[in-house]
Image: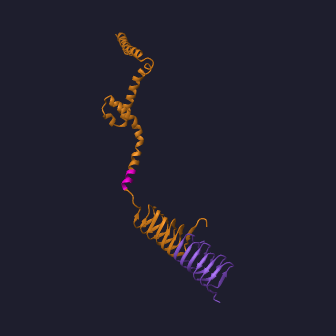
Protein backbone atom coordinates (compact mmCIF):
# COMPACT_ATOMS: atom_id res chain seq x y z
CA UNK A 1 0.00 0.00 0.00
CA UNK A 2 2.94 2.33 0.62
CA UNK A 3 3.89 2.27 -3.05
CA UNK A 4 0.69 2.21 -5.05
CA UNK A 5 1.26 0.29 -8.23
CA UNK A 6 -1.47 -0.61 -10.65
CA UNK A 7 -1.05 -3.68 -12.78
CA UNK A 8 -3.33 -4.79 -15.55
CA UNK A 9 -2.49 -8.47 -15.66
CA UNK A 10 -1.87 -10.49 -18.77
CA UNK A 11 -5.31 -12.10 -18.69
CA UNK A 12 -7.23 -8.89 -18.08
CA UNK A 13 -8.96 -6.66 -20.59
CA UNK A 14 -9.87 -3.09 -19.71
CA UNK A 15 -12.00 -1.09 -22.11
CA UNK A 16 -12.84 2.47 -21.21
CA UNK A 17 -11.18 5.41 -19.58
CA UNK A 18 -8.35 4.85 -17.15
CA UNK A 19 -6.88 7.70 -15.15
CA UNK A 20 -4.86 8.08 -11.98
CA UNK A 21 -1.87 9.46 -10.07
CA UNK A 22 0.37 6.43 -9.82
CA UNK A 23 2.51 4.14 -11.92
CA UNK A 24 0.60 1.80 -14.20
CA UNK A 25 1.92 -1.43 -15.65
CA UNK A 26 0.00 -3.09 -18.43
CA UNK A 27 0.66 -6.74 -19.17
CA UNK A 28 -2.78 -7.36 -20.62
CA UNK A 29 -5.03 -5.37 -22.87
CA UNK A 30 -6.38 -1.85 -22.52
CA UNK A 31 -8.65 -0.08 -24.98
CA UNK A 32 -9.93 3.47 -24.63
CA UNK A 33 -7.89 6.20 -22.98
CA UNK A 34 -5.23 6.41 -20.30
CA UNK A 35 -4.45 9.53 -18.30
CA UNK A 36 -1.72 9.32 -15.67
CA UNK A 37 0.42 11.82 -13.78
CA UNK A 38 3.20 9.24 -13.52
CA UNK A 39 4.76 6.46 -15.53
CA UNK A 40 2.97 4.10 -17.85
CA UNK A 41 4.75 0.83 -18.58
CA UNK A 42 3.50 -1.46 -21.30
CA UNK A 43 5.23 -4.77 -20.76
CA UNK A 44 6.06 -7.35 -23.39
CA UNK A 45 2.77 -9.00 -24.28
CA UNK A 46 0.77 -5.95 -23.29
CA UNK A 47 -1.52 -4.49 -25.91
CA UNK A 48 -2.80 -0.95 -25.64
CA UNK A 49 -5.18 0.59 -28.12
CA UNK A 50 -5.75 3.96 -26.55
CA UNK A 51 -4.92 7.63 -26.54
CA UNK A 52 -2.45 8.22 -23.75
CA UNK A 53 -1.60 11.25 -21.65
CA UNK A 54 1.12 10.50 -19.11
CA UNK A 55 4.32 11.90 -17.66
CA UNK A 56 6.55 9.04 -18.79
CA UNK A 57 5.83 6.08 -21.01
CA UNK A 58 7.94 2.96 -21.44
CA UNK A 59 6.63 0.80 -24.24
CA UNK A 60 7.84 -2.78 -24.52
CA UNK A 61 4.61 -4.13 -25.91
CA UNK A 62 2.20 -3.00 -28.58
CA UNK A 63 0.68 0.45 -28.52
CA UNK A 64 -1.74 1.85 -31.07
CA UNK A 65 -2.80 5.41 -30.37
CA UNK A 66 -1.49 8.87 -29.79
CA UNK A 67 0.88 9.46 -26.91
CA UNK A 68 1.33 12.78 -25.14
CA UNK A 69 3.96 12.72 -22.42
CA UNK A 70 5.09 15.57 -20.15
CA UNK A 71 8.61 14.15 -19.89
CA UNK A 72 9.58 11.20 -22.02
CA UNK A 73 8.48 8.34 -24.22
CA UNK A 74 10.77 5.34 -24.35
CA UNK A 75 10.17 2.61 -26.92
CA UNK A 76 12.28 -0.39 -26.08
CA UNK A 77 13.69 -3.04 -28.35
CA UNK A 78 10.48 -5.10 -28.15
CA UNK A 79 8.19 -2.07 -28.45
CA UNK A 80 5.82 -1.65 -31.37
CA UNK A 81 4.07 1.71 -31.62
CA UNK A 82 1.74 3.16 -34.20
CA UNK A 83 0.57 6.71 -33.55
CA UNK A 84 1.76 10.22 -32.93
CA UNK A 85 4.11 11.01 -30.07
CA UNK A 86 4.34 14.39 -28.39
CA UNK A 87 7.01 14.62 -25.72
CA UNK A 88 10.15 16.67 -25.00
CA UNK A 89 12.20 13.47 -24.86
CA UNK A 90 11.57 10.56 -27.20
CA UNK A 91 13.84 7.53 -27.13
CA UNK A 92 13.66 4.94 -29.90
CA UNK A 93 15.96 2.05 -29.14
CA UNK A 94 17.56 0.00 -31.87
CA UNK A 95 15.16 -2.80 -32.70
CA UNK A 96 12.02 -0.90 -31.82
CA UNK A 97 9.42 -0.19 -34.49
CA UNK A 98 7.42 2.98 -34.78
CA UNK A 99 5.11 4.57 -37.30
CA UNK A 100 3.81 8.09 -36.83
CA UNK A 101 4.83 11.63 -36.12
CA UNK A 102 7.09 12.81 -33.32
CA UNK A 103 6.78 16.27 -31.85
CA UNK A 104 9.43 17.26 -29.31
CA UNK A 105 8.01 20.74 -28.89
CA UNK A 106 9.37 24.13 -29.86
CA UNK A 107 13.12 24.54 -29.88
CA UNK A 108 15.42 26.98 -31.62
CA UNK A 109 17.71 25.26 -34.06
CA UNK A 110 20.04 28.29 -34.17
CA UNK A 111 20.64 28.09 -30.44
CA UNK A 112 21.44 24.43 -30.63
CA UNK A 113 23.90 24.92 -33.47
CA UNK A 114 25.51 27.87 -31.68
CA UNK A 115 25.93 25.71 -28.58
CA UNK A 116 27.55 23.05 -30.72
CA UNK A 117 29.86 25.67 -32.22
CA UNK A 118 30.84 26.78 -28.74
CA UNK A 119 31.67 23.23 -27.79
CA UNK A 120 33.75 22.87 -30.93
CA UNK A 121 35.59 26.11 -30.23
CA UNK A 122 36.26 24.95 -26.67
CA UNK A 123 38.03 21.81 -27.83
CA UNK A 124 40.78 23.62 -29.78
CA UNK A 125 41.06 25.97 -26.80
CA UNK A 126 43.58 23.54 -25.29
CA UNK A 127 46.16 24.15 -28.05
CA UNK A 128 45.50 27.87 -27.62
CA UNK A 129 47.33 27.51 -24.31
CA UNK A 130 50.42 26.85 -26.40
CA UNK A 131 49.55 29.83 -28.54
CA UNK A 132 49.38 32.27 -25.62
CA UNK A 133 53.17 32.53 -25.09
CA UNK A 134 53.59 32.77 -28.83
CA UNK A 135 51.41 35.86 -28.82
CA UNK A 136 53.74 37.61 -26.38
CA UNK A 137 56.71 36.64 -28.45
CA UNK A 138 55.00 37.79 -31.57
CA UNK A 139 54.71 41.18 -29.92
CA UNK A 140 58.43 41.07 -29.17
CA UNK A 141 59.06 40.03 -32.71
CA UNK A 142 56.90 42.92 -33.88
CA UNK A 143 59.00 45.24 -31.76
CA UNK A 144 62.05 43.82 -33.42
CA UNK A 145 60.32 44.56 -36.74
CA UNK A 146 60.37 40.97 -37.88
CA UNK A 147 57.99 39.95 -40.64
CA UNK A 148 54.65 38.30 -39.80
CA UNK A 149 55.29 35.37 -42.10
CA UNK A 150 57.05 33.10 -39.59
CA UNK A 151 54.20 33.62 -37.10
CA UNK A 152 51.72 32.47 -39.74
CA UNK A 153 53.69 29.29 -40.34
CA UNK A 154 53.45 26.10 -38.34
CA UNK A 155 54.08 25.97 -34.63
CA UNK A 156 57.42 24.30 -35.09
CA UNK A 157 58.73 27.41 -36.75
CA UNK A 158 57.12 29.53 -34.06
CA UNK A 159 58.78 27.47 -31.38
CA UNK A 160 62.18 27.87 -33.02
CA UNK A 161 61.61 31.60 -33.26
CA UNK A 162 60.61 31.52 -29.61
CA UNK A 163 63.78 29.79 -28.62
CA UNK A 164 65.72 32.31 -30.59
CA UNK A 165 64.03 35.14 -28.78
CA UNK A 166 64.46 33.50 -25.39
CA UNK A 167 68.14 32.87 -26.05
CA UNK A 168 68.63 36.38 -27.28
CA UNK A 169 67.03 37.96 -24.24
CA UNK A 170 68.97 36.10 -21.49
CA UNK A 171 72.29 37.04 -22.99
CA UNK A 172 71.34 40.66 -22.76
CA UNK A 173 69.67 40.47 -19.33
CA UNK A 174 72.34 38.30 -17.67
CA UNK A 175 74.91 40.75 -18.79
CA UNK A 176 73.02 43.67 -17.30
CA UNK A 177 70.97 42.30 -14.37
CA UNK A 178 73.73 41.17 -11.94
CA UNK A 179 75.64 44.36 -12.32
CA UNK A 180 72.69 46.70 -12.66
CA UNK A 181 70.99 46.53 -9.18
CA UNK A 182 73.71 47.97 -6.88
CA UNK A 183 75.17 50.95 -8.68
CA UNK A 184 74.07 51.29 -12.25
CA UNK A 185 75.95 54.17 -13.78
CA UNK A 186 79.52 53.42 -12.71
CA UNK A 187 79.54 49.59 -12.91
CA UNK A 188 77.69 49.38 -16.20
CA UNK A 189 79.88 51.98 -17.74
CA UNK A 190 83.04 50.11 -16.70
CA UNK A 191 81.63 46.68 -17.63
CA UNK A 192 80.60 47.79 -21.07
CA UNK A 193 83.90 49.38 -21.75
CA UNK A 194 85.99 46.49 -20.43
CA UNK A 195 84.03 43.50 -21.91
CA UNK A 196 83.87 44.36 -25.61
CA UNK A 197 87.52 44.97 -26.14
CA UNK A 198 88.68 42.00 -24.04
CA UNK A 199 87.39 39.21 -26.34
CA UNK A 200 88.63 41.08 -29.35
CA UNK A 201 92.09 41.20 -27.83
CA UNK A 202 91.95 37.50 -26.86
CA UNK A 203 90.57 36.50 -30.22
CA UNK A 204 93.14 38.50 -32.02
CA UNK A 205 95.80 37.11 -29.77
CA UNK A 206 94.72 33.48 -30.39
CA UNK A 207 94.50 34.06 -34.09
CA UNK A 208 97.81 35.75 -34.12
CA UNK A 209 99.36 32.98 -32.00
CA UNK A 210 97.91 30.36 -34.30
CA UNK A 211 99.18 32.20 -37.32
CA UNK A 212 102.52 32.60 -35.66
CA UNK A 213 102.68 28.85 -34.85
CA UNK A 214 101.70 27.93 -38.35
CA UNK A 215 103.95 30.49 -39.75
CA UNK B 1 0.56 -15.01 -9.70
CA UNK B 2 -1.14 -13.52 -12.68
CA UNK B 3 -2.74 -10.59 -11.01
CA UNK B 4 -4.35 -7.31 -11.84
CA UNK B 5 -4.19 -4.50 -9.34
CA UNK B 6 -6.10 -1.27 -9.66
CA UNK B 7 -4.18 1.13 -7.44
CA UNK B 8 -5.74 3.52 -4.98
CA UNK B 9 -5.41 6.60 -7.16
CA UNK B 10 -6.61 4.94 -10.34
CA UNK B 11 -10.03 5.56 -11.81
CA UNK B 12 -11.30 3.24 -14.52
CA UNK B 13 -14.47 4.16 -16.34
CA UNK B 14 -15.41 1.28 -18.57
CA UNK B 15 -15.26 -2.46 -18.57
CA UNK B 16 -12.79 -4.85 -17.02
CA UNK B 17 -12.84 -8.44 -18.18
CA UNK B 18 -10.41 -11.29 -17.95
CA UNK B 19 -9.37 -14.60 -16.51
CA UNK B 20 -7.31 -13.78 -13.43
CA UNK B 21 -7.58 -12.30 -9.98
CA UNK B 22 -8.45 -8.61 -9.71
CA UNK B 23 -7.54 -6.43 -6.74
CA UNK B 24 -9.34 -3.11 -6.61
CA UNK B 25 -7.85 -0.41 -4.41
CA UNK B 26 -9.04 2.46 -6.57
CA UNK B 27 -12.23 3.30 -8.38
CA UNK B 28 -13.92 1.24 -11.07
CA UNK B 29 -17.04 2.39 -12.83
CA UNK B 30 -18.94 0.47 -15.50
CA UNK B 31 -18.70 -3.28 -15.57
CA UNK B 32 -16.47 -6.00 -14.17
CA UNK B 33 -16.54 -9.45 -15.72
CA UNK B 34 -14.06 -12.01 -14.43
CA UNK B 35 -13.77 -15.76 -14.19
CA UNK B 36 -11.59 -15.67 -11.09
CA UNK B 37 -11.59 -13.74 -7.82
CA UNK B 38 -12.28 -10.07 -7.16
CA UNK B 39 -10.96 -8.34 -4.07
CA UNK B 40 -12.36 -4.94 -3.28
CA UNK B 41 -10.03 -3.60 -0.65
CA UNK B 42 -10.85 -0.97 1.96
CA UNK B 43 -9.95 1.95 -0.28
CA UNK B 44 -11.66 0.37 -3.29
CA UNK B 45 -14.81 1.83 -4.78
CA UNK B 46 -16.80 -0.11 -7.36
CA UNK B 47 -19.76 1.43 -9.10
CA UNK B 48 -20.41 -1.38 -11.51
CA UNK B 49 -22.21 -4.58 -12.17
CA UNK B 50 -19.89 -7.40 -11.22
CA UNK B 51 -19.87 -10.88 -12.68
CA UNK B 52 -17.26 -13.20 -11.23
CA UNK B 53 -16.46 -16.46 -9.54
CA UNK B 54 -15.66 -15.12 -6.08
CA UNK B 55 -15.81 -11.60 -4.71
CA UNK B 56 -14.58 -10.34 -1.37
CA UNK B 57 -15.73 -6.87 -0.43
CA UNK B 58 -13.91 -4.83 2.21
CA UNK B 59 -14.59 -1.55 0.48
CA UNK B 60 -17.60 -0.13 -1.26
CA UNK B 61 -19.62 -1.71 -4.05
CA UNK B 62 -22.64 -0.18 -5.71
CA UNK B 63 -24.20 -2.45 -8.31
CA UNK B 64 -25.54 -5.89 -8.92
CA UNK B 65 -23.28 -8.84 -8.19
CA UNK B 66 -23.50 -12.24 -9.78
CA UNK B 67 -21.03 -14.82 -8.50
CA UNK B 68 -20.74 -18.42 -9.58
CA UNK B 69 -19.24 -19.44 -6.25
CA UNK B 70 -19.26 -16.98 -3.36
CA UNK B 71 -19.85 -13.39 -2.27
CA UNK B 72 -18.29 -12.24 0.99
CA UNK B 73 -18.88 -8.84 2.57
CA UNK B 74 -16.35 -8.38 5.35
CA UNK B 75 -16.59 -6.13 8.37
CA UNK B 76 -16.35 -2.60 7.09
CA UNK B 77 -17.54 -3.57 3.62
CA UNK B 78 -20.50 -1.66 2.20
CA UNK B 79 -22.61 -2.98 -0.61
CA UNK B 80 -25.71 -1.62 -2.28
CA UNK B 81 -27.32 -3.83 -4.94
CA UNK B 82 -28.66 -7.25 -5.63
CA UNK B 83 -26.52 -10.30 -5.02
CA UNK B 84 -26.94 -13.62 -6.75
CA UNK B 85 -24.66 -16.44 -5.65
CA UNK B 86 -24.87 -19.93 -4.16
CA UNK B 87 -22.87 -18.79 -1.08
CA UNK B 88 -23.22 -15.39 0.45
CA UNK B 89 -21.41 -14.30 3.61
CA UNK B 90 -22.21 -11.04 5.37
CA UNK B 91 -19.91 -10.46 8.33
CA UNK B 92 -20.74 -8.65 11.50
CA UNK B 93 -20.19 -4.95 10.90
CA UNK B 94 -20.84 -5.15 7.19
CA UNK B 95 -23.38 -2.87 5.56
CA UNK B 96 -25.68 -4.25 2.89
CA UNK B 97 -28.80 -3.05 1.17
CA UNK B 98 -30.45 -5.07 -1.60
CA UNK B 99 -31.86 -8.39 -2.61
CA UNK B 100 -30.16 -11.71 -2.02
CA UNK B 101 -30.70 -14.68 -4.30
CA UNK B 102 -29.01 -17.97 -3.32
CA UNK B 103 -30.87 -19.82 -5.99
CA UNK B 104 -32.49 -22.03 -3.41
> Is A111 colored magenta in this rendering?
yes
What residue lies at 41% left-to-right and 37% top-to-bottom? A130
> Is A62 colored magenta in this rendering?
no
What residue lies at 40% left-to-right and 36% top-to-bottom? A132
**Could you tell me what secondary structure mostly forms the magenta stretch?**
helix
Residue B54 appears in the figure: no
The foreground one among A42 and B50 is: B50
Q: How many marks?
A: 0
Q: What is the drawing colour of chain A?
A: orange
Which chain did the renderer colour purple?
B
* Residue A29 picture location, percent across and down: 51, 73
- Identify the residue at the far bottom of this view: B104
The foreground one among B79 and A62 is: B79
Region rendered in magenta: A109-115
* Residue B18 picture location, percent across and down: 55, 77
In the rendered structure, the answer to whether residue A204 lies left or right of residue A6 reads: left
Residue A62 appears in the figure: yes
In the rendered structure, the answer to whether residue A151 lies left or right of residue B4 reads: left
Color scheme of the displayed model: by chain
- Image quadrant occupied by the N terminus of chain A: bottom right
* Residue A159 picture location, percent across and down: 38, 33
The foreground one among A25 and B12 is: B12
In this rendering, the answer to whether A12 lies above or below A166 is below
* Residue B7 picture location, percent across and down: 57, 70
The foreground one among B48 and B5 is: B48
In this rendering, the answer to whether A130 lies above or below B77 is above
Amino acid sequence: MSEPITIIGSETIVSGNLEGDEDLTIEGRVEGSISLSKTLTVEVGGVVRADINVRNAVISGVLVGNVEAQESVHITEQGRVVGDISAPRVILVDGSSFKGNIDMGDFNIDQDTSERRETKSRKPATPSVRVRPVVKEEVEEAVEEESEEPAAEEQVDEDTSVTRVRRAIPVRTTGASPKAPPVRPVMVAKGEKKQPPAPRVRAIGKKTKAKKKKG
Amino acid sequence: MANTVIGSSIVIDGEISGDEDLVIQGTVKGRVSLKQNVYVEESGVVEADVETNNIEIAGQVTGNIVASDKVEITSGGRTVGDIKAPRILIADGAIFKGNVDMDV
